[in-house]
Amino acid sequence: MDPLVITKGRYTYAHDVKKGPPEAIDVHHIMVAGGFMFCTYALLFAITGFLILLLLLNITSVCQVLMPDKPVASVLWSFTLAGFTLRQLLRKQVEKESVVILPAFGVQLETTYKSGRTVHHFVPIGKILKPVLNECVTPVTCYWSLSLILRGEEELLLVFKELYPPVTMLVPIWKALCAAIDDKNALACIQIATLDDAL
Amino acid sequence: MSQQGKHRILMVSDFFYPNFGGVENHIYYLSQCLMKLGHKVVVMTHAYKNRSGVRYMTGGLKVYYVPWKPFLMQNTLPTFYGTLPIVRTILIRERISIVHGHQAFSTLCHEALMHARTMGYKVVFTDHSLYGFADVGSIHMNKVLQFTLADVSQAICVSHTSKENTVLRSGLPPERVFVIPNAVDTAMFKPAPERLSSHEIVIVVISRLVYRKGADLLVEVIPEVCRLHPNVRFIIGGDGPKRVRLEEMREKHSLQDRVDMLGAVPHAKVQSILITGHIFLNSSLTEAFCIAILEAASCGLLTVSTRVGGVPEVLPDDMIVLAEPDPSDMVLAITKAIHLLPQIDPQAMHDRMKKLYSWHDVAKRTEIVYDRALNCPNQNLVERLPRYLSCGAWAGKLFCVVMIIDFLFWRLLQLWQPDRDVEVVPHINLTSPQSGEEMWDSCAADERCR
């Protein structure tokens, strides 16, 4: 099947169907682009400015905390601090979030960061009661989000934890999740029916 | 925006369900009747404890409980420009054509109306209460009202007395103020199925026990009436700071068997309390309109009330006995009411009320106001500023500065998040058995067409 691709603003949606036993596996990706490059350069600029400021403070010996008698050490220390801050910020940058629907088995939620790290979260199909499209209201805005109602849990599970994709991209994923849950429910009903017949 | 003259209305107020009160009920019933007429209504209010986000009420009435914490007497913290982003988002995503604000005491209402005017929407304001002119609180409130009403498309008041009060406080030209009284849900407030026996007269009082509602008058009136008429009993429903005074009065005159204090009565139980009585006593010191006496009349009770504010305009003369807000005058009025009781037929009273007051009538009249508001000309910022200048020597200039800053913030917000990036909500028909997937398919089709 040809992969379906929709692009809107910073977000790109791609739909893949992989062949795999026992049935086809549905994969939906939401990728974020563009914002990162600007952030890097702005960040580098900010960090350079921060370092220059620190150096100036060291030279004028105003700041006691930064060991004015050891300028080399304090410069190295400020570089380390800047590097650490940059690394923390980069770790948070999301490249892609995916939803892998394994029919009759479960749903895998994956978050891939720019640093290459991937976080997986698997939800067994029996635990999902229903996928819902929710309107979330914050003090400054209102947006759509896709969540799963889980059996036995009070809180909804967000499918896309870091990204806020537009609702046109959420709808096909929601429909695919609904179809997978309905198939599983139908299968369960047939199994119960055959069990009753056998008894 | 509007098809075949149907509007998309945003009701804004700090006062809405789960609170019960005059303003809250007014917004709810008006919204339901407007939806029956084919308009789309969305309500915006602040969050109540953990009730936050989007909720749907009967008939598909969508309510936005915006998570701004209330800070004083149910009002949202006034930040002037803090609510601009969320108001703009709601107006665009719901494709609103008219914004209708309720109650002069609601800060969220004033802010939302200001932002709606900045963004070019037509605005209607309804005032539900009477306010004074002399104390510090009233003076500031009136200035804020003057600011909001300087540029409102149309205004509505609930009685002619209220219209006079609003026009004097705000300087609004009287031609732009409509009078549309409140109404009562006569289907809910029905008289008792059997007539009560008349050997013991029961007088019912249901109100918040606060100074404004005349609780102090009750403290004087009740012992006197009990002394003059041995067959009279009182039922007092409601709670408040003055409850202690009433309890003391009961103790002092040993009226425990003749005065029942019920405490706070939930709105759903009000009718069952009213039908146990013959007479309804209202001792308010000020009222723009009084829905409580409408509810009482709909249940077939004869009303005795103080002649204040808009109360004389509410009921026909044969359903109400009026008195000055003075204990001796009220005692005389109650005596007169007791003598009039044999002539009262509760069912006939209820049938008359059904014809006199109905929320459908209020909705039709409000629709006319909306049509008039939409016909007002569109004006840009420069044309609107002179209206604010006339509010006062210093206040006028201050208001102009506030509006200019609001306009600049709006433009900045448009640069950061353009209007087309705000996703429009598809039309969800909650009353028809349409599956969720079909609804989103039709919404996607709409989007492609646009």
Image (spheres, coloured by chain):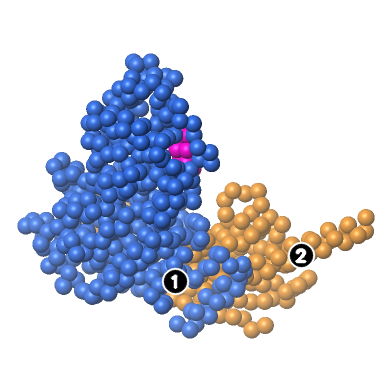
Chain colours: A orange, B blue
Q: Is residue B392 above or below residue B373?
A: above
Q: Is residue B156 above or below residue B212?
A: below
Q: Is residue A115 visible?
A: no
Which quarter of the rendered picture does the N terminus of chain B lie within? bottom left
Residue at image location 29% in from the left, 33% down from the top = B333
Q: Position of residue A129 (x, y in %)?
A: 66, 57
Q: Which residue is mark 2?
A: A186
User: Under tag 1, what secondary structure?
Assistant: loop
Q: Identify the subunit bearing mark 2.
A: A
Chain ID at mark 1: B
Tell me, yes or no, if residue B156 can be seen here. yes
Q: Quadrant of residue B438?
A: bottom right
- The quarter of the picture where the C terminus of chain B appears is bottom left
Residue lying at 91% horizontally and 60% vertically, measured from the top left: A197
The verdict on residue A176 being magenta is: no
In this picture, which residue range is highlighted in magenta? B268-276
For residue B398, what is the image quadrant? bottom left
B80 displayed left or right of A182: left
> In the displayed image of the protein, which residue is found farthest to the left?
B393
Kindly identify which residue carries mark 1.
B424
The residue at the point 28 percent across, 45 percent down is B311
Who is closer to the viewer here, A164 or A41? Answer: A164
Q: Amino acid at mark 1?
A: Val
